[in-house]
């Protein structure tokens, strides 16, 4: 597996995490819990953005694997 | 009038009269009555019974006695709420039996308790050894309450300095296969949400005996058919596992990559994810 596809996998996992976090941030009854999930959402958002930027660089370096 | 009809009428009348009066006297648990309140209730019961079976011939006289025994406690209770002095006069005060681990013999004598009785009561509060007891008090209801020495008390999360997620009480939203719309609406959820959840679990609404939603919005169901094994909601554990996986991925990439800038970025995010896991641990793992 190339580095690019590994990073893509991690990106997919993180996006899944984000989806679940968003569900919990909406359906939690306690304000404290909601806040914790919302903060986690913000953190993962930043990480995903950086990871996507890195992926662009990787795809540029390994153009033959682009799209996989 | 035939005798049996009279007794029937008296009984009916008194049944509803005492029922009403007892409701007026408030809701106190029978086991938590003071000695006097117990006598009071007994007298009311006996008077009602005596009138009802015509031992007391005149209904009017009987009801007068009944009203006195019902009204006085209500008046006293009202006064007791208003004044601490009257409260102590009516209900008495609690007696300290053990203080700083030492038995107060005089108070024991005043309360007419023997040593055996004290020890028995302590045992019923799970304090088998007198050495473990810091403080014990005889309540006005005759119950003995006990505080254990601080090093013998059960461990709480506070003692362990561990953070626990705040939890509200779960709401029951399905009972006997019927949706309880009121509690569902209280949670800000609707039938569509419930249908989706049940579909995800692969069960039909008519097969659910009890369904509860906890404070983080997870649904737990108990089915009529006990042969079917329901999976416990484990979305949170999975979420934590995913976070753990991503965190280890980032650490790996940080080690592998040649690019200095990317190395820094990976390392930073690995640390952020680790902090995030620590924060969410109390919510996700339980």
Image (spheres, coloured by chain):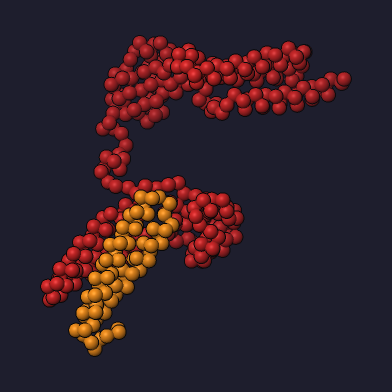
Chain colours: A orange, B red
Residue B213 in the image: above or below residue B36: below
Q: Is residue A64 visible?
A: yes
Q: Position of residue B50 (x, y in %)?
A: 71, 17
For the point 29% across and 18% down, the residue is: B102
Q: Position of residue B239 (x, y in %)?
A: 34, 63
Q: Position of residue B161 (x, y in %)?
A: 25, 43
Residue A67 in the image: above or below residue B104: below
For the point 48% across and 21% down, the residue is: B141
Task: Depth check: give the residue in front, B140 or B275.
Answer: B275
Q: Position of residue B3 (x, y in %)?
A: 84, 20
Task: Depth check: give the residue in front, B77 or B83.
Answer: B83
Q: Is residue B55 visible?
A: no
For the point 54% across and 63% down, the residue is: B192
Task: Depth check: give the residue in front, B110 or B215.
Answer: B215
For the point 27% across and 58% down, the residue is: B277
Residue A62, quarter of picture:
bottom left
Residue A67 in the image: above or below residue B252: below
Q: Residue furthest right?
A: B1
> How many numbered marks are there?
0
Residue B50 in the image: above or below residue A56: above
Looking at the rendering, in which quadrant would you find the N terminus of chain B?
A: top right
Residue B218, quarter of picture:
bottom left
């Amino acid at each position: 597996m190339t580095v690019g596809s590994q990073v893509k996998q991690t990106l997919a996992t993180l996006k899944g995490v984000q989806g679940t976090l968003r569900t919990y941030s909406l359906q939690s009854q306690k304000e404290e819990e909601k806040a914790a999930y919302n903060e986690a959402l913000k953190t993962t958002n930043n990480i995903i953005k950086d990871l996507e930027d890195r992926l662009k660089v990787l795809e540029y370096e390994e153009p033959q694997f682009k799209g996989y | 009038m035939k005798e049996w009809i009279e007794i029937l009428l008296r009984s009916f009348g008194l049944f509803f009269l005492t029922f009403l009066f007892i409701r007026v006297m408030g809701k106190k648990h029978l086991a938590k009555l003071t000695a006097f309140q117990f006598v009071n209730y007994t007298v009311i019961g006996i008077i009602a019974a005596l009138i009802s079976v015509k031992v007391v011939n005149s209904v009017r006289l009987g009801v007068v006695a009944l009203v006195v025994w019902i009204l006085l406690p209500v008046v006293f209770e009202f006064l007791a709420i208003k004044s601490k002095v009257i409260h102590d006069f009516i209900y008495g005060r609690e007696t300290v039996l053990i203080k700083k681990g030492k038995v107060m013999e005089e108070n024991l004598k005043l309360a007419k308790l023997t040593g055996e009785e004290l020890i028995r009561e302590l045992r019923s509060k799970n304090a088998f050894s007198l050495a473990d007891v810091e403080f014990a008090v005889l309540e006005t209801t005759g119950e003995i309450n006990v505080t254990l020495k601080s090093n013998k008390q059960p461990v709480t999360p506070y003692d362990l300095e561990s953070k626990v997620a705040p939890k509200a009480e779960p709401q029951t939203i399905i009972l006997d296969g019927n949706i309880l719309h009121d509690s569902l609406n209280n949670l800000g959820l609707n039938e569509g949400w419930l249908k989706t959840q049940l579909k995800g679990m692969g069960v039909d609404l008519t097969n659910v005996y009890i369904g509860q939603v906890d404070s983080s919005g997870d649904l737990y169901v108990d089915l009529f058919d006990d042969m079917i094994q329901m999976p416990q909601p484990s979305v949170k554990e999975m979420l934590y596992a995913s976070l753990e996986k991503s965190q280890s991925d980032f650490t790996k990439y940080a080690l592998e990559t040649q690019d200095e800038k990317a190395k820094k970025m990976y390392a930073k995010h690995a640390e952020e994810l680790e902090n995030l896991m620590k924060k969410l641990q109390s919510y996700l793992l339980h």
